[in-house]
Image: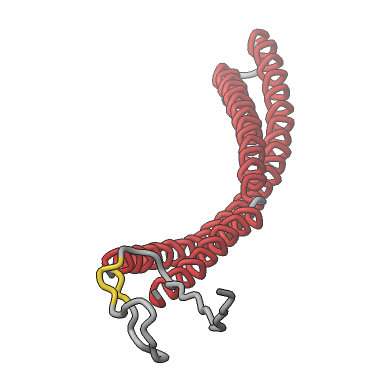
Amino acid sequence: DDAQISADVVPVAARIGGQVTSVNIIENQRVQKGQLLAEIDPLDAKARLAQAQAELETAMAQAAESDAKVSITRATASGGLTAAQGAMQGSREGVDASVNAIAQARAVVTRTTANAEKARLDFQRAEELGGKGDISRAQVDAARAAHEAADADLAQARAGLAAAENNHQAAQANVQQAQGRLQQSTSVPAQISAAEATAQIAHARVKTAQAALQQAELM
């Protein structure tokens, strides 16, 4: 009644789960290494393999797109910074040129003001002399014409000064706009870093998908 038997018990577990379609042994049958014990429906494994392949292809496409975006971001951002720096330099030169133009216009106004005052006094004196008969009417008319011409030159010089001042204001506005564009473009390193980080994540997903595919192929 107390008889005992000694034997080895070896658990056999399948690498994958699934529905068993056939069992090729019977209970207590002796088996050999490598012998087929049972068969599992391969449909689930094939579906998982196909899904892993699709996920890998998607991950690779996303990684390629991310790499392209990195290149585009580098080129676009760097080009934008260069253009903004050039615009800033050009706008500053425009301000300097407008300052010089104002100085020249003011000099012209000073000269034509003096000429106009002299022509006014000459005409006033010519009228007095003409009234006394000391000079001819033609001389008086010539003095009047010179006075009118000098006034016209003065008006033109003042208009030129006003235009130069307006151009100076416009040049200053251009500097402010260029400064704004330059400030926006100084974020180039951040833009490139963000694109590179996205690309790194995409490549990490590729590695994960490759590992999942290898696992699916073993099933």
In-front residue for pair 58/151: 58
Furthest residue toward front: 1
The answer to whether residue 153 is above or below residue 183 is: above
Q: Considering the image in quadrants, where does the C terminus appear?
A: bottom left
Residue 35, image x and y in percent? 35, 88
**In the rendered view, does 67 fall on the left or right side of 40?**
right
Residue 116, image x and y in percent? 68, 24
Residue 184, image x and y in percent? 63, 45
Q: Does residue 142 appear anywhere in the picture?
A: no
Asked where in the image residue 60 lies, by quadrant, the reply is bottom left
Asked where in the image residue 40 lies, by quadrant, the reply is bottom left
Tally the marks: 0
Residue 61, image x and y in percent? 39, 65
**In the rendered view, does 68 fall on the left or right side of 21?**
right
The answer to whether residue 118 is above or below residue 37 is: above
In-front residue for pair 134/15: 15
At x 45%, y 68%, the residue is 212
Asked where in the image residue 54 lies, by quadrant, the reply is bottom left
At x 70%, y 29%, the residue is 115
Q: Considering the image in quadrants, where does the N terminus appear?
A: bottom right
Q: Does residue 119 appear anywhere in the picture?
A: yes
**In the rendered view, does 100 fall on the left or right side of 207?**
right
